[in-house]
């Protein structure tokens, strides 16, 4: 699904150049659940943003579903991103002025999905995530865990081939955080491909593989043999 070779990212200011990613090698197969860990500033969120086509890179190769991303313009990257990637952010990134239904529906509008189909798909995903009774509420009327469920629904509404999660429990208490991790585990069990950036060993324990980064490089990749069984 994803093949990255010798990927390098350099941030340049007037006084200094910072190599955020240094010759990254990475392969992600369809159906995997992978966590990326490492200290702040190690490059893990930069890597996630590049994989999500939100940021560009300086050199190397990044292939997503056999499409080489290097050299594509923003329009081409946007088209691939909308068709294949769903995002879950630490800060939820919901629009306060819109109710839950409208927040979930927004990606479908961007993809020019007909109104009748949008209604069916929003209600289906809301039913799946147990937020049908919240569709007319606004984000500020929801708990943190409920807001993240809405964000997950929005991420899934276009049936993405890969879900990218950046510290998805970072703003949640332990109860709501566990709820979100159990939800991601359930999605993975249904076949979703998930790449998650996290500082939490507990959250990483839900994934199949853990990648450790430091100073813009991948130090190690290891299978996680202590995957949490949320189904008992």
Image: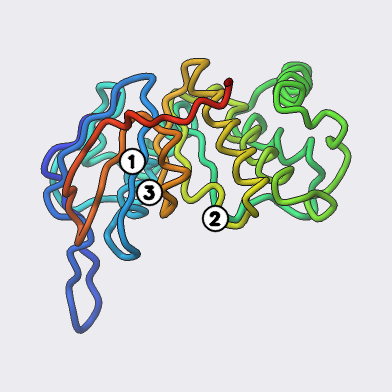
Is 213 located above or below residue 80 in the figure?
A: below
N-term mark: 2 or 3:
3
Q: Mark 1: give few (<14), some (14-19) or many (20+) Cα within 10 Å.
A: many
Q: Residue 60: which quarter of the image?
A: top left
Give the residue pinned by disc 2.
170
Give the residue pinned by disc 1.
51
- Foreground residue among 220 and 141: 220
Look at 76% across and 55% down and name the residue there.
Answer: 96
Disc number for residue 71 = none
- Image marks 3 and 1: residues in contact by CB distance under 8 Å: yes
SS for tag 3? helix
Q: Is residue 150 left or right of residue 6?
A: right
Q: Mark 2: give few (<14), some (14-19) or many (20+) Cα within 10 Å.
A: some
- Foreground residue among 101 and 56: 101
Give the residue pinned by disc 3.
49
Is 113 located above or below residue 107 in the figure?
A: above
N-term mark: 2 or 1:
1
SS for tag 1? helix
Look at 47% across and 30% down and name the residue there.
Answer: 228
Calculate the distance from the C-alpha at mark 2 to the C-alpha at mark 1: 20 Å
Is 222 located above or below residue 166 in the figure?
A: above
Which quarter shows the C terminus? Answer: top right
SS for tag 2? loop
Calculate the distance from the C-alpha at mark 2 to the C-alpha at mark 3: 17 Å
**Outermost residue to the bottom:** 15
Look at 29% across and 22% down and name the residue there.
Answer: 29
Calculate the distance from the C-alpha at mark 3 to the C-alpha at mark 1: 5 Å
């Amino acid at each position: 699904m994803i093949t990255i070779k010798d990927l390098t990212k350099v941030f340049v200011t007037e006084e200094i150049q910072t190599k955020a990613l240094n010759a990254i090698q990475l392969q992600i197969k369809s159906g995997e659940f992978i966590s990326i860990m490492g200290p702040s500033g190690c490059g893990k969120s930069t890597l996630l943003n590049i994989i999500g086509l939100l940021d560009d890179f300086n050199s190397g190769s990044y292939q997503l579903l056999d499409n080489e991303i290097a050299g594509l313009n923003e329009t081409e990257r946007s088209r691939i991103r909308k068709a294949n990637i769903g995002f879950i952010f630490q800060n939820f990134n919901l629009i306060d002025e819109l109710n839950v239904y409208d927040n979930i529906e927004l990606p479908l509008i961007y993809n020019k999905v007909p109104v009748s189909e949008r209604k069916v798909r929003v209600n289906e995903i809301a039913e799946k995530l147990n937020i049908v009774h919240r569709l007319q509420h606004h984000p500020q009327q929801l708990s943190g865990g409920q807001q993240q469920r809405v964000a997950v629904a929005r991420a899934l509404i276009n049936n993405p081939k890969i879900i990218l999660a950046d510290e998805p429990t970072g703003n949640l208490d332990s109860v709501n955080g566990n709820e979100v991790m159990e939800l991601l585990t359930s999605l993975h069990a249904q076949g979703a491909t998930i790449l998650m950036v996290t500082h939490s060993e507990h959250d990483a324990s839900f994934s199949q593989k853990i990648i450790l980064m430091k100073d813009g490089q991948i130090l190690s990749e290891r299978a996680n043999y202590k995957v949490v069984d949320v189904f008992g």
